[in-house]
Image (cartoon, rainbow, N blue to C red):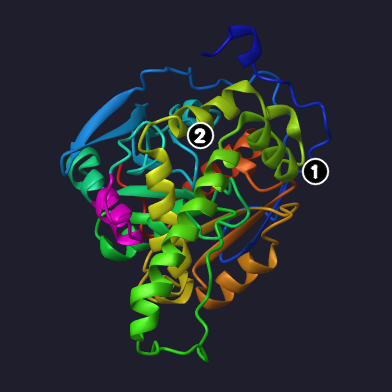
């Protein structure tokens, strides 16, 4: 359970150096913001907020505000609560949704065959059945263990936008990289021998279960989560009990370990099927990259490469680590709101 005194927001007392926008954008070349002195935070509810039944599974989401819809999609291992400092601020001008993807957060830990397109279908249906009007998608890449390199929230936002262009009018990604395809990669797999099928494959499965079971147990320990988060948050004041418990609580679900195993063996280890270039080539809306330049895992060079491939991209560089929306939310919120204002002023203005 959460203890109220421990969940109070820590005031950021370090120097914020502002944000810089580059690329195809009418946003100013630089923006400077003072550290927040009490940014409103989404109240934690152990029972969750709203729920929606999707394909027989219970899906958790948060909804606040009125206006043009913004849908926030968390990264691997996170939940809607990772947008705790963004939802209240964005909801002052927009209708904000934060949805937990199937298998994560307060959504069901369904024992299904996970594939990236499962989450695409979930968000597509969420837009059609819950949002019911054009929207902006915002995706994040959260990494609880460095072995996980896939950008879950970011990929889901991108592939949903390419699948539903009439309803997604813009996409924003936060340190959400993913992988570009390798044109020289081998496209055919060698034929499986009897030895591999009968002996080696079962042994590999057993070995994977043992190793991944241990990794999952280790990864969900509060001390381990806190350590990993502090290694990627350059300002660690927001690595608090609220954040840590919002990650550990879903991991205590009886099915969480099996979901982790299925994700790691059937999705994360087959990332070559889902490449940035294949998704970006189908995108048709404006793209914003909010990038924590101090991220020790994914540097700003990836954002530049994305823009080179997809010119209709704006880049905002933040002096922050891997999770800028939670580390410097006042700057991330301002950058996102400024970008939304440019869409309002463009020829394809957001519907009001």
Position of residue 98 measured from the top left corner of the image (x, y, whole percent): 39, 36
Residue at x-position 38% and y-position 62%: 266
Position of residue 275 measured from the top left corner of the image (x, y, whole percent): 45, 72
- Is the stretch drawn in magenta largely helix, strand or loop? helix
Would residue 31 appear left or right of 333 to someone viewing this image?
right
- Determine the CA span between mark 1 and mark 2: 22 Å
Residue designated by label 2: 83
Residue at x-position 71% and y-position 45%: 232
Magenta region, residue range: 111-124
Give the class, few, some or many, for how many residues have Cα within 10 Å of label 2's Cα (few <14, many ≥20). many
N-terminal of the pair, mark 1 or mark 2, is 1
Residue at x-position 43% and y-position 51%: 261
Whether residue 43 can be seen here: yes
Residue at x-position 53% and y-position 77%: 309
Would residue 112 appear left or right of 339 to someone viewing this image?
left
Front residue of 148/23: it is 148
Give the class, few, some or many, for how many residues have Cα within 10 Å of label 1's Cα (few <14, many ≥20). some
Locate the C terminus and report the quarter of the image it occupies: top left
* Residue 101 lies in the magenta stretch: no
Position of residue 45 measured from the top left corner of the image (x, y, whole percent): 42, 17
Helix, strand or loop status at disc 1? loop
* Residue 121 lies in the magenta stretch: yes
Residue designated by label 1: 17
Would residue 317 appear left or right of 287 to someone viewing this image?
right
Would residue 219 appear left or right of 196 to someone viewing this image?
right
């Amino acid at each position: 359970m959460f203890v109220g005194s421990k969940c109070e927001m820590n005031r950021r007392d370090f120097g914020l150096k502002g944000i810089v926008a580059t690329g195809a954008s009418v946003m100013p070349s630089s923006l400077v913001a003072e550290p927040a002195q009490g940014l409103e935070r989404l109240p934690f509810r152990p029972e969750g907020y709203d729920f929606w039944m999707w394909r027989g599974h219970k899906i958790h989401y948060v909804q606040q505000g009125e206006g043009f819809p913004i849908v926030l999609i968390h990264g691997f291992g996170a939940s809607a609560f990772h947008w705790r400092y963004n939802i209240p601020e964005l909801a002052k001008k927009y209708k904000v949704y934060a949805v937990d993807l199937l298998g994560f957060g307060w959504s069901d830990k369904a024992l299904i065959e996970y594939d990236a397109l499962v989450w695409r279908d979930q968000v597509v249906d969420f837009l059609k059945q819950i949002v019911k009007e054009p929207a902006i998608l915002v995706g994040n890449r959260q990494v609880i263990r460095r072995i996980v390199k896939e950008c879950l929230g970011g990929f889901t936002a991108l592939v949903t936008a390419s699948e539903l262009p009439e309803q997604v009018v813009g996409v924003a990604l936060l340190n959400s990289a993913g992988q570009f395809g390798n044109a020289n990669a081998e496209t055919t797999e060698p034929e499986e021998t009897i030895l591999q099928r009968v002996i080696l494959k079962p042994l590999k499965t057993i070995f994977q279960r043992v190793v991944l079971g241990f990794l999952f147990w280790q990864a969900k320990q509060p001390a381990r989560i806190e350590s990993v988060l502090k290694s990627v948050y350059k300002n660690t004041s927001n690595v608090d009990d609220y954040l840590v418990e919002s990650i550990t609580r879903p991991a205590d679900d009886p099915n969480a370990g099996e979901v982790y195993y299925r994700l790691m063996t059937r999705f994360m280890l087959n990332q070559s099927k889902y490449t940035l270039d294949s998704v970006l080539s189908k995108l048709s809306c404006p793209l914003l990259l909010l990038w924590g330049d101090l991220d020790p895992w994914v540097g700003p060079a990836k954002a530049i490469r994305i823009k080179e491939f997809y010119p209709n991209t704006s880049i905002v560089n933040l002096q922050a680590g891997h999770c800028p929306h939670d580390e410097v939310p006042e700057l991330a919120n301002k950058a996102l709101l400024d970008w939304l204002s440019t869409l309002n002023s463009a020829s394809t203005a957001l519907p009001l």
